[in-house]
Image: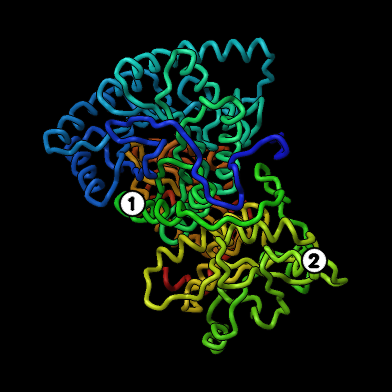
Amino acid sequence: MTPSAANLSYTPDLFRYQRRVSRAVNVGGVGVGGDNPIRVQSMLTCDTMDTEKCIEQTLELVKVGCEIVRITAPTVKDAANLQHIVAGLRQRGCLVPIVADIHFKPEAAMEAAKWVDKVRINPGNYADSKKFKVIEYTDEQYAAELERIRERFTPLVLLSKERGIAMRIGTNHGSLSDRIMNRYGDTPLGMVESALEFARIARDNGYHDFVFSMKSSNPKVMIEAYRLLVARLAQEGADWNYPIHLGVTEAGDGEDGRIKSAIGIGSLLKDGVGDTIRVSLTEDSVHEIPVARELAEHCTQSVAAVPPAAPSWDPFSYSRRSTSSIGQIGGENLVQVAIRKAGYEKIAHKLDKMGDFKPDFVYEESGVIEVDPRDDAAVAAINQSERSQLVAVKDELPLPVIASYRLLACKLDQRHPIILKDTLLPAVESHDFLPTLITAASNVGSLLCDGIGDAILIQGEEAPGQSMRLAFNLLQAAGSRIFKTDYVACPSCGRTLFDLQTTTARIKAATSHLKGVKIAIMGCIVNGPGEMADADFGYVGGAPNKINLYIGKQAVKFNIPEAEAVERLVDLIKEHGRWVEPPASVASAT
């Protein structure tokens, strides 16, 4: 069970931005945490044994503003080649810190630690096992397993300490060990406890140059895990103030991947949590950097204070705010999408062609009451009304969106539904869409993941069609309203056993009409089976040019030739009764 919010705190103020105080960790001359800016990093997608390609991709990333570069080292041979990659970069005058990404093989970590500035290990598979076995561990058996892990992990800690290099203790929701799963379940608490076990071993050896991460493909899980981590670190003591690495893993590509990343990363940055970030897109790595830089700049700005109030929600356990229904808004209804009247008039003639992106209601015709949440008398008047009222925060208040709506939710009787806005300012003509997306996803997404909001209004985007698309895609990414096929797709790296971008496009072309079906596309088995915990079907690289197909966590088809795999995936979906034929327009397009 997740600890109650009553005795945990992950931020000193839910209504005003204050960056979490952390110690600084040196990563090859780049400071992470402390007074340093939010650092932006990414990962190579090529084979680690291709030295020149790794150097080329690293230089490309540095050119667009990447400050730390990670390279996978799946084997000792790959890890050894990091020496040549680092040497080649230094010969070219490139001093960017290099991080080795390690899964499964402590021997590879020991080799990599000789050459790089930082090593990332995953507690779920570094010296632990994941075979989806159900084992009831006694306290003695659990302690014995921890001692075995200590023996395997301590040499890396000592080598890192000796060389003065950093480490990331990076838990992934998709790769929790059987030991953790059987004691804590597939939960944010399990993610946190898994990381703390390794951190205690590091500290016992006098080693403190490490950062934490808690990644998941589900923004709600990711947000809860990071909040719980920060709260648990504060409980452990002031000297547990280690930096935090943020990321939504397997976010996917395009607008969906950017929205999902902005919800998870942006909401935490706005609460002052996070010292370095990586946006994981199923695209060339250079496309991750502008999104990360926008998040780092947009989500860490100082904001005006608002009066304090006690939160009416549990930040560590998602539960939608319980409200009365007003028509189709509130209660048990799906989160609705509103549109301004002026926007509706622009698209009214083509509603029948907008498919799933049609607005649910016109804002001005909904009877909504706008209020300044600081005005206690105005809020009290709404609370005294016999009928439930639809409520929104007034435009153009000098307040941040998240803080103003949190304050409103604290003061407003729960029976009153709330309409969320992405911004309290009018849309600006001729602007870059990325900041609009980041603003909407981080503001509205954060509130939805707190359980606040019964409808949303996107008013930062002037074009009504585009604002509708953004609104519905945001609801999908937050898990608030599933209206299309949902994809979990990992970014490529040197472990990937097929071309992720091309394959993802082919799978989407064949399945994008399957509303409510969740499909995971994984380049290898590192996070595959676990990250697919809530996926219906999985497409996972099992060997070079061979694909394994999954139902949930269970592999059911093995070693399928890549050329046949998408068709076999469709067959699998049909076998389990989840297939519908695509509309004629979609079928002809594919």
Which residue shows up at 67% across the image and 58% down it? 407
Seen from this angle, which residue lies furthest right? 386
- Mark 1 / mark 2, whichever is N-terminal: 1
Q: How is the image coloured?
A: rainbow
Q: Is residue 433 above or below residue 503?
A: below
Residue underneath mark 2:
380
Q: In which quadrant of the rendered view does residue 225 lie?
A: top right
Which residue shows up at 51% across the image and 51% down it? 270
Secondary element under disc 1, as helix, strand or loop, is helix
Q: CA distance from mark 1 to mark 2?
A: 46 Å
Tally the marks.
2
Instruction: Please name the amino acid that badge 1 sits on.
Output: Ile
Which residue shows up at 57% across the image and 34% down it? 229
Instruction: Please name the amino acid that badge 2 sits on.
Output: Ala
Q: Looking at the figure, which quarter contains the C terminus?
A: bottom left
- Residue 433 shows up from this direction: yes
Q: Residues within 10 Å of mark 1 (few under 14, many from 20)?
A: many
- Residue 545 shows up from this direction: no
What percent of the width, then of the height, locates residue 10? 59, 39
Q: Is residue 64 above or below residue 185?
A: below
Seen from this angle, which residue lies furthest left? 91
Residue 289's label in the rendered image is 1
Residue 367's label in the rendered image is none
Q: Nearer the viewer, residue 183 or 243?
A: 243
Secondary element under disc 2, as helix, strand or loop, is helix
Q: Judge from the rendering whether residue 78 lies leftward or rightward of residue 140; answer left or right.
A: left
Q: Residues within 10 Å of mark 2 (few under 14, many from 20)?
A: few
Q: Nearer the viewer, residue 381 or 117?
A: 381
What percent of the width, then of the height, locates residue 277? 41, 44
What percent of the width, then of the height, locates residue 470? 51, 67
1 vs 2, front mark: 2
Which residue shows up at 78% across the image and 71% down it? 389
